[in-house]
Amino acid sequence: MEVSLSAIHKSFGKHQVLRGIDLKVEEGEIVALLGPSGCGKTTLLRIVAGLETPDTGEVLVGNASPSSKPVVGFVFQHYALFPHMTVFENVAFGLRVRKRADRLPEPKLRKRVEELLALIRLEHLAESRPTQLSGGQRQRVALARALAVDPAVLLLDEPFGALDASVRKELRRWLKKLHEELKVTSILVTHDQEEASEIADRLAVINHGVLEQVGTPHEVYSRPASPFVSTFLGDANVVQCEVQGGSVRAADLRLTLNGHAGHAVDGKKATVVIRPHDLELLSTAESAGYRDVDDGLLATVRRVRNTGPLVRVDLLTKGGLLLEAQLLENARLAVDTEVSIRVRSHRLFLE
Ligand SMILES: Nc1ncnc2c1ncn2[C@@H]1O[C@H](COP(=O)(O)OP(=O)(O)OP(=O)(O)O)[C@@H](O)[C@H]1O
């Protein structure tokens, strides 16, 4: 079922937590709510679950509001499994507490639970207690329990947040595959952009209760709608500039304005965002031919860090700007070398 949120506002006391959220999650889609701690992700998820009511705005799950109790599966960060029950009984729980008229007969219920345990590849642990499982296994059981009742929507609140990095990586690939198989409409809350990009069809980036951008991970990364989105997804150099004579300038950085930005008046403030891999470094000899190019900048190498396949280079331009470049291989750059920087691509946000 699809989920449709329109103009959702929510405050706790004087604190405005959600400020006019519009979002549609299509049938079978998985959307990640992504944003820094405290931006309102969990509150929005709880509103979809019907655990919280918005002050204004409308929530629809299919054609119904959460108050009419469409079936929603919820997985929390901390495995809320019942410690005194076996894995099998934990997964069966939602099926056993159904109204008598809706309850499956015991053989069918057992078959359903066995199917779910096979789906999460934990058939062999059916009779174990949650305390005998690893954190990752417990979260898989929590997911099977949420799926047992055939939810219209699956809500996942930082489901892997309490696990260590390698288990998280493994589980997010597993969740992505599982979602491709089951196609349950899902909303995932996370503050980890790598996790969101790997699992979700689309990202909904929230900052201070406002939805800043919704799009595929590629769209959001390559065409960020705001400086906040640029810096939240991936590394970025952010430079505060001013428009002057058809260019934006900050210290010795000068970038020509194109398109309708070309009409911006002098003195207008702008933010320029440059991905570190969009900075090209040339030796000063190589750059001789580029000297009169608009975006050529002279800089000194301040620091070189090898981080796996990437080399991160801190640069200080002649005009005093600090920039980071990322190169795929070490171009034998030594500290204090003078280089010329070319800006291959940038995003401009006029105020
Ligand atoms: N029941 C509540 N009463 C008062 N304030 C609340 C309540 N629930 C949430 N808040 C506040 O609302 C803000 C948003 O909280 P929320 O849990 O939605 O953020 P979040 O983006 O999920 O953050 P995190 O990633 O840290 O979980 C926070 O400042 C939080 O303190």
Image (cartoon, grey):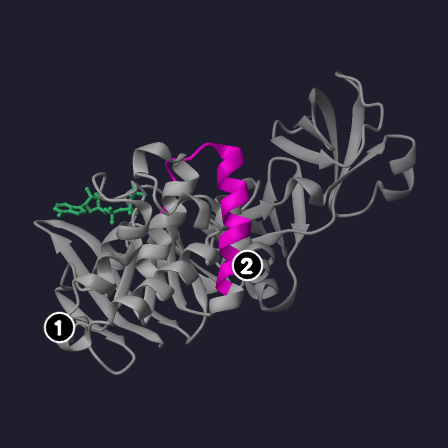
- The type of residue carrying mark 2 is Lys
Q: Residue at x 81, y 28 (%)?
A: 330
Label 2 sits on residue: 177
Residue 270 makes an appearance in the image: no
- Residue interval drawn in magenta: 157-179
Q: Under tag 1, what secondary structure?
A: helix
Disc 1 under 8 Å from ligand 1? The reply is no
Q: Mark 2 or mark 1, which has the lower sequence index?
A: 1
Q: Whole-Å distance between the Cαs marked 2 and 1?
A: 34 Å
Q: Main secondary structure of the magenta part?
A: helix
Percent position of residue 216, x then y: 54, 63
Which one is in front, 97 or 176? 97
Which one is in front, 326 or 54? 54
Which one is in front, 140 or 46? 140
Q: Looking at the image, do the residues carrying marks 2 and 1 touch, with CB atoms under 8 Å apart?
A: no
> Residue 104 occupies which quadrant of the picture?
bottom left
Percent position of residue 188, x then y: 39, 56
Taking the image as shown, residue 334 lies to the left or right of residue 93, namely right
Establish if 195 lies above or below 109: above
Q: Residue at x 22, y 43 (%)?
A: 82
Q: Residue at x 61, y 30 (%)?
A: 321
Q: Residue 100: which numbered mark, if any?
A: 1
Quarter of the figure that contains the N terminus: bottom left
> Of circles 2 and 1, which is in front?
1
> Residue 212 occupies which quadrant of the picture?
bottom left
